[in-house]
């Protein structure tokens, strides 16, 4: 699979469809403008001052364009009103969806997977997601399981990577082995890293705005006056026409929006498939997950009746829809494996879909089959031998080694350049994913004691930020005591001991593990912590590697 070409093609197509979506919204606004201008021009023609507009225009009426030219202020206000209704409705819908992905997961009955879970399948899920987050350099998203869903499916929700959530069905845990589940999670991480969640929210908001136009049109149509004298009747019929036009145009725009949203969704699913292969260097895992969906009777269909809102976010189709939000399963499989033989699916159906243990339950990414043609992979032209780009250290068999030591050996290292490090965020490579597993396994278990509550997680964050310089540390301690009091400073001092056991290479991955817990703090507390963190960072008036 040439996933770079697939990614470029999917991005081009999705950008084109988004552009068409915006054109459709603009067309609705212009058409509704024309209808309203026509009605207003007719009312002017029958008003007491129509003569000033009737010169050179028999009957005193104006066409919509002439009306707009002669009344630019009214035309501007009407257009602004229509655009404002769509924009405000869009913002309202977007605000509903910006509470974080956890809100969406909980609305479907999702159960949060805690860090200390004892369930092997959920622990495996959490390990995979943590590894992908470490490799990507983004906060660990919250993790939920839909216990009542026996089908294989998953989705990522949230407005930004900072409040993202990944949710999988119980069927995915019951049927997928580690490589297959990793392929699905890689697919969902692609949605997070490529900004698909934000794009989905924007499209959903615009579609809701068109729906509001249709609803307003229906209200105007139903309640516009139809009686009275001839003049009132003509005026009332004009507003009946406006209401009918708004209703028709709103619903037509809604229909066009749904079609284009589905088209955008199909392209982003193709992009996510290609990105998952890039992240994991493994086509068989993602292909296996899609094959199992096709072979199972329940497939990927949701049981929940209120899953419509997340239909376009799902890994595979969860509902029967007129406009498909996902490419056909067999088409996605063929894109992953051009030599795919449909007989493979028939054989799987006849044998029965194995559980996770039947396909290598608990296997690691070290068993992945490399994808030919992937640059920067061990053993390939331009390979790095597995070094993590943009870091000051690389892993050795014995643990963490500085880049200088690695440079002297067979494995190449990278200088701790801020620009290089920043460029790596959100762009995991296969070597990053491989080494993220080793990093996760080396994070001290004591960190779990500080991820149970928001207050404990906050203390660990502050402990990790304290300087090694006694003078600077004293200044930072005074700032913490000033903000939270002496009790918090004592808790931070307790966390310092645990923080001291975290190797430099593990400090950032350890910090990322705390984000799901920190997200549960009230917004005001998160803002307060953020301000304090910025103060602690700037106390020494210098920038160094975390």
Image: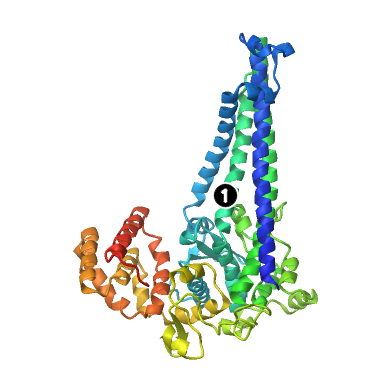
Q: Is residue 121 left or right of residue 398?
A: right
Q: Is residue 388 above or below residue 154?
A: below
Q: Quadrant of the C terminus?
A: bottom left
Mark yes or no: residue 363 visible.
Answer: no
Question: Badge 1 is on which residue?
Answer: 202
Against 358, residue 219 (above or below) is above
Q: What's the colour scheme?
A: rainbow
Residue 62: x, y in percent? 69, 19
Left-right relation of 487 to 290: left
From the viewer's side, name the closer residue of 394 and 464.
394
Corner quadrant of residue 146: bottom right
Q: Nearer the viewer, residue 398 or 312?
A: 398
Q: Residue at x 71, y 77 (%)?
A: 352
Q: Position of residue 248 (x, y in %)?
A: 69, 34
Q: Does the rendering let one see residue 88? A: yes
Judged from the image, the secondary structure of the residue bearing numbered disc 1 is helix
Q: In the rendered image, which quarter contains the N terminus?
A: bottom right
Q: Is residue 224 above or below residue 527?
A: above
User: Residue at 31% of width from left, 64% of height from top?
Assistant: 537
Q: How far across and down, in percent of the image, does residue 31 sit?
A: 68, 33
Residue 512 lies in quadrant? bottom left
């Amino acid at each position: 699979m040439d996933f770079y070409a697939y990614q470029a093609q999917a991005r081009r197509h999705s950008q084109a469809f988004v552009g068409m979506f915006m054109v459709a919204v603009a067309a609705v606004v212009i058409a509704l403008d024309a209808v309203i201008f026509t009605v207003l021009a007719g009312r002017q023609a029958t008003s007491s001052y129509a003569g000033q507009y009737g010169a050179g225009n028999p009957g005193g009426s104006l066409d919509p364009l002439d009306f707009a030219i002669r009344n630019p202020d009214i035309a501007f206000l009407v257009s602004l009103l229509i655009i404002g209704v769509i924009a405000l409705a869009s913002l309202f819908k977007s605000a509903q969806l910006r509470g974080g992905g956890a809100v969406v997961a909980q609305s479907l009955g999702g159960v949060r997977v805690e860090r200390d879970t004892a369930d092997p399948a959920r622990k495996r899920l959490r390990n995979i997601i943590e590894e992908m987050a470490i490799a990507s350099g983004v906060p660990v998203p919250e993790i939920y399981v839909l216990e009542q869903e026996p089908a294989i499916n998953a989705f990522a929700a949230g407005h930004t990577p900072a409040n993202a959530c990944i949710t999988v069905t119980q069927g995915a845990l019951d049927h997928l082995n580690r490589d297959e589940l990793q392929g699905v999670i890689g697919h969902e991480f692609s949605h997070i890293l490529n900004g698909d969640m934000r794009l989905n929210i924007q499209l959903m908001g615009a579609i809701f705005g068109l729906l509001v136009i249709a609803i307003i049109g229906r209200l105007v149509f139903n309640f516009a006056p139809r009686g009275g004298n001839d003049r009132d009747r003509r005026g009332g019929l004009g507003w009946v026409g406006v209401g009918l036009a708004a209703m028709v145009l709103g619903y037509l725009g809604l229909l066009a929006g749904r079609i284009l949203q589905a088209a955008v969704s199909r392209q982003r699913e193709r992009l996510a498939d290609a990105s998952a292969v890039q992240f994991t260097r493994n086509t068989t895992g993602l292909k296996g997950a899609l094959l199992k969906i096709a072979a199972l009777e329940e497939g990927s269909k949701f049981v929940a009746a209120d899953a419509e809102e997340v239909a376009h976010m799902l890994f595979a189709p969860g509902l029967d829809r007129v406009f498909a939000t996902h490419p056909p399963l067999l088409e996605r499989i063929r894109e992953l494996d051009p030599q795919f033989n449909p007989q493979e699916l028939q054989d799987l159906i006849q044998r029965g879909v194995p559980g996770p243990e039947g396909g290598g339950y608990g296997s690691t990414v070290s068993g992945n089959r490399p994808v030919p043609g992937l640059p920067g992979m061990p053993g390939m032209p331009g390979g790095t031998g597995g070094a993590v780009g943009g870091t000051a250290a690389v892993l050795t068999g014995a643990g963490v080694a500085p880049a200088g030591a690695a440079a002297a050996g067979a494995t190449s290292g990278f200088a701790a350049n801020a620009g290089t490090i920043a460029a790596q965020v959100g762009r995991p490579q296969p070597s990053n994913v491989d080494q993220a597993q080793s990093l996760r396994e080396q994070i001290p278990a004591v960190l779990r004691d500080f991820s149970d509550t928001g207050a404990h997680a906050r203390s660990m964050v502050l402990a990790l930020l304290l300087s090694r310089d006694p003078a600077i540390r004293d200044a930072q301690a005074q700032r913490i005591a000033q903000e939270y009091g002496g009790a918090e400073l004592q808790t931070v001092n307790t966390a310092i001991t645990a923080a001291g056991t975290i190797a430099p290479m593990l400090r950032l991955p350890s910090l990322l593990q705390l984000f799901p817990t920190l997200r549960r703090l009230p917004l005001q507390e998160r803002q307060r912590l953020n301000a304090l963190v910025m103060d602690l960072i700037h106390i020494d008036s210098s920038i160094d590697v975390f």
